Image (cartoon, rainbow, N blue to C red):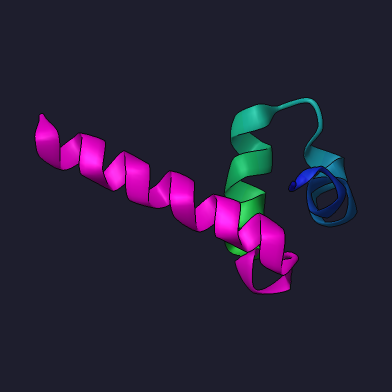
Amino acid sequence: MCTGDAMRLCGHEVPNVQRITACMVRHRAQVSPGCRAVMDREHAARRRAATAE
């Protein structure tokens, strides 16, 4: 869902996944609605996992 946004906004960071992720977070306001939904879902899952520890 985020591939197009990642290439458009953060293609200069390829192939470093951590840098791409950080770049996508910085450009969150510019990503497509579908990608933002995925990012929000993954963020919520990480928060739940962190609180469960």
Which residue of the protein is positioned furthest toward the bottom in this rendering? 29
Q: Which residues are magenta?
A: 28-53
Along the viewing direction, whichever of 30 and 45 lies nearer the viewer: 45
What is the quadrant of the C terminus in the image? top left
Q: Position of residue 35 (x, y in %)?
A: 68, 56
What is the count of numbered marks? 0
Q: Position of residue 42 (x, y in %)?
A: 46, 44
Q: Is residue 25 above or below residue 28?
A: above
| Secondary structure character of the magenta stretch overall | helix
Q: Position of residue 13 (x, y in %)?
A: 78, 38
The residue under the point 69% across, 60% down is: 34
Q: Is residue 44 above or below residue 21?
A: below
Residue 49: name its quadrant: top left
Residue 10 in magenta stretch: no
Residue 36 in magenta stretch: yes
Left or right: residue 49 compared with residue 1: left
The residue under the point 61% across, 61% down is: 36
Left or right: residue 2 compared with residue 25: right
Which residue of the protein is positioned furthest toward the top in this rendering? 15
Left or right: residue 40 compared with residue 4: left
The residue under the point 65% across, 53% down is: 24
The residue under the point 66% across, 29% down is: 17
Along the viewing direction, whichever of 15 and 32 lies nearer the viewer: 32
Left or right: residue 39 compared with residue 12: left
Q: Position of residue 12 (x, y in %)?
A: 86, 42
